Amino acid sequence: MESDGVSLPLIHKHPMMPFNDLRRGDCCRLFKSESDGYYCELCDIFVHKKCGDLPGYINHPSHPNHTLRLQEKPGHTCALCEGRIWNLCYSCEMCDFVVDLHCAKYPPPDVIANLETHPHKLTLVKEETCRFKCCAKCGKYGDGFTYKCDECDVAFHVECAWHPAPLDHPTEVNHSYHSLHPLKLHTGSPPDYSDRMCRLCGRWIQEELFYHCSSCNFTLDMRCVLNPPPKSLVDLKAHDHQLTLLPRLDSFTCNACGLKGVRSPYACFICGFMIHQDCLSLPRVININRHDHRVSRASVLGDGAMNSVCGVCLLRMLIQLYTDAILSM
């Protein structure tokens, strides 16, 4: 009964029941070593107890002028680490400053000295800056909060310059893509009997943390454990119908690029269409400046097309992506 539930008005509109599970929390999108939390059966939402017991308002040193409120803001970006907000965060209602739960708990220091990657003192710039290139190994661009060196006039992402308390990864998790058994935390190299690759994304796993089920020879890297690809996709450039991810080892031919695949395609149960995850963004029709007509994608060549050449690079066609790109030039 609803009267027996726990009211968490800042987190969820329905009463929630005390619940124990090793699944990822819908509050912070993380797995926790503690299994206790709250569950809404109507919405199938699980909230960690630690997240459910967070204060409604906090004062944060990275935003001293205003109080931050605990809110749901999925799709926003953390001002400190530039990570995606999946659900709960602390935000300023006056100026739209947003931090995720981890950065709210572990605020970056104002000054960092003795940094391994830079010889000078770095100062935290507590405002969104113009787009900059990070001088750490990542070499990526950013536009959020930065650490700057006044002597060298260089900038670093907050997460590249400062490493907060590490996440406490649980020894076992119940993952949505492998419901038969819990996945156990491992470190180092995957077992010799495995293919040493993540079942979902196909990335090679080397000396690092990963989760594995020995009974099923099922392995996930940390990225796919914490942020797995969606189970289904609609309104895509690649296909008209809903596509569903099949998390298994299976040989298939991608209907977008025509190449073979060996793991976890997206498939259409209506027409049998199958596609690599990396090919989802391929449009079906494109315009190119070397041809007057629109170019349509095809994965099967017509009779005699194997002797044709690409109309752009003039190399002989072995596999065809866009039919009208076989031109006579």
Image (cartoon, rainbow, N blue to C red):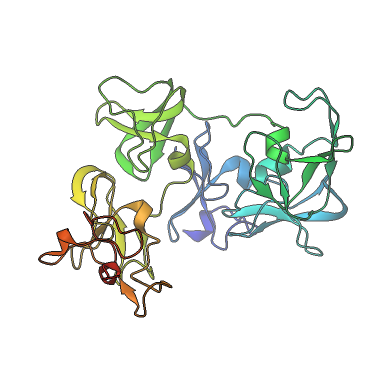
Report how many numbered discs are placed on residues in the image: 0
- Residue 186: percent from left, percent from top: 42, 23
Q: Is residue 231 visible?
A: no
Q: Position of residue 312 (x, y in %)?
A: 35, 63
Q: Which residue is drawn at 21% across and 63% down?
A: 269
Quadrant in which the C terminus appears: bottom left
Horizontally, is 82 left or right of 254 in the view? right
Identify the residue at horizontal 23%, vertical 57% (top origin).
317
Give the quarter of the image for residue 184.
top left
Which image quadrant for residue 174? top left
Q: Which of 157 and 294 is in front in this view?
A: 294
- Residue 214 in the figure: left or right of residue 55: left
Most foreground residue, 182 or 167: 167
Q: Position of residue 138 (x, y in %)?
A: 62, 38
| Residue 236 x, y percent position in the rendering | 38, 68
Q: Residue lying farthest left?
A: 303
Of all residues shown, which one is farthest toward the bottom? 292
215 w.r.t. 298: above or below: above
Judge from the rendering whether residue 282 lies leftward or rightward of residue 169; answer left or right: left
Q: Is residue 251 left or right of residue 184?
A: left
**48 or 290: which is nearer to us?**
290
Residue 276 appears in the figure: yes
The residue positioned 89% from the left and 34% from the top of the image is 151
